[in-house]
Image (spheres, rainbow, N blue to C red):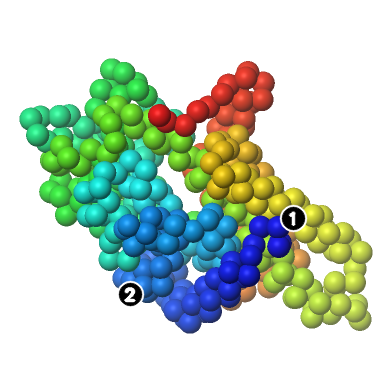
Amino acid sequence: MSTYFTEEHDFFRKSFQDFLQKEVVPHIEKWEETGHIERFVWEKFGEMGYFGINYPEQYGGMDLDLFYTVIFLEELQKINSGGFAAAMWAHAYLAMTHLNKEGNHEQKEKYLAPSITGEKIGCLCITEPFGGSDVSGMRSTAVKKADKYIINGSKTFITNGVYSDYLIVAAKTSPEMGNKGISIFVVDRDTPGISATKLDKLGWRASDTGEIAFDNVEIPAENLMGEENKGFPYIMQHFALERLIMGINSHARSEWALEYTIAYMKERVAFGKSISKFQALRHKVAQMASEIEMCKTFNYVTTQRLDQGEYVVKEATMSKLISTKVADEVAYDCLQMLGGYGYMEEYPLARNLRDSRLGPIGGGTSEILREIIAKMVMDGKNYKPAT
């Protein structure tokens, strides 16, 4: 779409496609099996500048517009490993976003700069065993004692939660204040008292998703990010980007699945003709193509507005709600088009179906998103960024 992408964008897309085919695709099957993405690929991403697309040049980034990020996300989806893609974007746009926005200069020098080069891997620790979409209900605490904080609690469903080098951790510094008592910290992985357990998942199998325990973890007071007790608005203001990312992932994953399915249908012969000639199947494809295009166009418009500085929390929430729903339906229907072959692991749509299923769950369930949207469109709720 020339409205949003320049020749420079197109060149970036082609070079990233080539990079993925050369450096990533040959290893995907192994990583899907082991659930461990080897360090060398993070460093290769760093060498090419892919982790620094949107970050300041001062720390080694390229400070490019958000449509480079769109390309980064779309092409990661098209190598058919939702887990690998998640590990990359959770590092670059969850952990690193907080570092860039709330971190001070010293924290950025220590953590953001090596994150851009791929020398350090980060994860974002918000979700807890007793509180997923209910961020304000978290139970983890960070108690200040002299010049230190003592963190206790647990987090779960954390992408890069096992093999990352540092953790961006949300904990309550003033529990009596509810959601107004949450703070954000950066914590080194090797700090005593941190333990992680890898979770066994339906999909996203290449990524390490962990449950993390904090047992009297002692960190310096200077590891506080931003202001104390401002963690909740910090988290909320970044949800717009996270939800839009998941919306973009969904339309890209759907687009890839449909392209694969159409190619298969043109080759598959039944009753003397290609199954792409059967009207019932053609109309199903037409419906899917229309819904994917609608999602993609809406996501591009929302990206442009976010890139221009608008606070698009409503639109990003709608993006995730609808795009992930469409992606699930496309994954299901595309697999059906392949018949028995769709159910076989040697064909790519079985993995696509599993990976897609997390879309309506992670980053805020669809049920929660509908309530957030209802508050905005029915009750006049006006969410604002942190000040």
Q: How many badges with numbers are in the image?
A: 2
Q: Quadrant of residue 116?
A: bottom left
Q: At 68% from the left edge and 54% from the top edge, which residue is drawn?
A: 296
Compared to residue 206, the image places residue 308 above or below, namely above
Q: At 51% from the left edge and 45% from the top edge, which residue is drawn?
A: 241
Compared to residue 170, the image places residue 86 above or below, namely below
Compared to residue 243, the image places residue 91 above or below, namely below
Q: At 74% from the left edge and 55% from the top edge, which residue is drawn?
A: 293
Mark 1 neighbour class, 10 Å CA radius: few under 14, some 14 to 19, many 20 or more: some
Q: Nearer the viewer, residue 305 or 382?
A: 305
Looking at marks 1 and 2 on the same chain, the residue that comes earlier in the sequence is marked by 2
Mark 2 neighbour class, 10 Å CA radius: few under 14, some 14 to 19, many 20 or more: few
Judged from this view, the residue extending furthest toward the left is 146
Looking at the image, can residue 330 be seen? no
Q: Nearer the viewer, residue 62 or 191?
A: 62
x, y (%) of residue 53? 45, 61
Q: Nearer the viewer, residue 254 or 72?
A: 72
* Left-right relation of 150 to 129: left
> What label does residue 293 carry, if any?
1
- Kind of residue sitting beneath label 2: Phe
Between the C-alphas of marks 1 and 2, the distance is 36 Å
| Quadrant containing the C terminus in the rendered view | top left
Residue receiving disc 2: 40
Q: Quadrant of residue 221?
A: top left
* Left-right relation of 370 to 109: right
* Left-right relation of 229 to 339: left
- Kind of residue sitting beneath label 1: Glu
